[in-house]
Amino acid sequence: MNARDIERLFIRTVSEYSRREREKRANELHLTDLTEQCMRRVWFEKHSPLPEPIDNLLRMWQGTMLHAMPLLKHHELELEFEGVKTRIDEYDDESGVLIEKKFVTFIPRTQDELMRYYSHYVKQVEYETLILTANDKPVNKAFLLFVCRGEPDAGRPPISVFEVSVNVDSVLDRFIAESRELEQMLKKSEPPPIPDNYSPFEYPCTYCKYVARCFSA
């Protein structure tokens, strides 16, 4: 075995792990499907997924390894509500604290930046709070924990935490409506249209492996 063989072994192992996870989720609804920024991407992932580029595979592997460290009593807690499955990063039933961990290259510093770039993560925490509550697990406080992957940009911290205020009653109707809409969308033979404000040269399309497929027509 030489150095190149070890590279191939690592990539093959990470690729196989990614493939198994994708196949396991193919016929299920997960919270990350519901909170994805682009429903077109979700349709492609369920109907005709592309293999992950090596840089995406490595980012996912790093995220998986970083998530492996527990912070609270319940770690990687698997729950389901109304046919939507999720895995809660961190939850403590005594204090009622929920923590969703995100490993990103851009750390938000303000609430405005949080909502501009990561509103879908805020929605995820809202829906996780709902799902926990629906499973008789009360949430008193919910947090988004951002940890920088690699060297942070100049002037930005390596770690940042935002508290997310959640009104479960107001979230419930939105969750039900969006989950039903997602179910109907996935039954269709064609993906939904590209959102009007999306561009192949701007976020979030610049991070998407389906960008060439979307904008080639």
Image: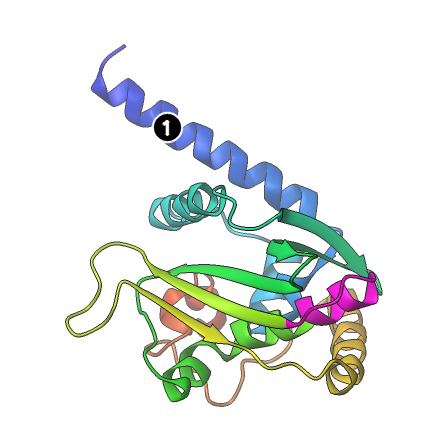
Q: Is residue 17 above or below residue 67?
A: above
Residue 26 horizontal/vertical position (percent): 69, 50
Residue 188 in view in this figure: no
- The quadrant of the picture occupied by the N terminus is top left
Residue 194 found in image quarter: bottom right
Nearer to me, 40 or 80: 80
The colour scheme of the drawn protein is rainbow
Within-10-Å neighbours for mark 1: few <14, some 14–19, many 20+: few
Secondary structure of the residue carrying tag 1 is helix
Q: Residue at x 79, y 57 (%)?
A: 80
Q: Residue furthest left?
A: 154
In the image, 152: left or right of 107? left
Q: Is residue 140 above or below residue 9?
A: below
Give the total number of marks visible in the rendering: 1
In the image, 23: left or right of 175? left
Query: Magenta stretch: residue 134 in it?
Result: yes
Residue 86 horizontal/vertical position (percent): 69, 56
Nearer to me, 121 or 15: 121
Q: Is residue 187 above or below residue 115?
A: above
Nearer to me, 98 or 85: 98
Magenta segment, which residues? 128-140
In the image, 119: left or right of 212? right
Residue 212 horizontal/vertical position (percent): 41, 66
Nearer to me, 25 or 144: 144
Give the amino acid type for the residue marked by disc 1 in the picture: Phe
Query: Magenta stretch: residue 158 in it?
Result: no
Q: Which residue lies under the disc numbered 1?
A: 10
Q: Residue at x 37, y 28 (%)?
A: 10
Residue 77 in view in this figure: yes
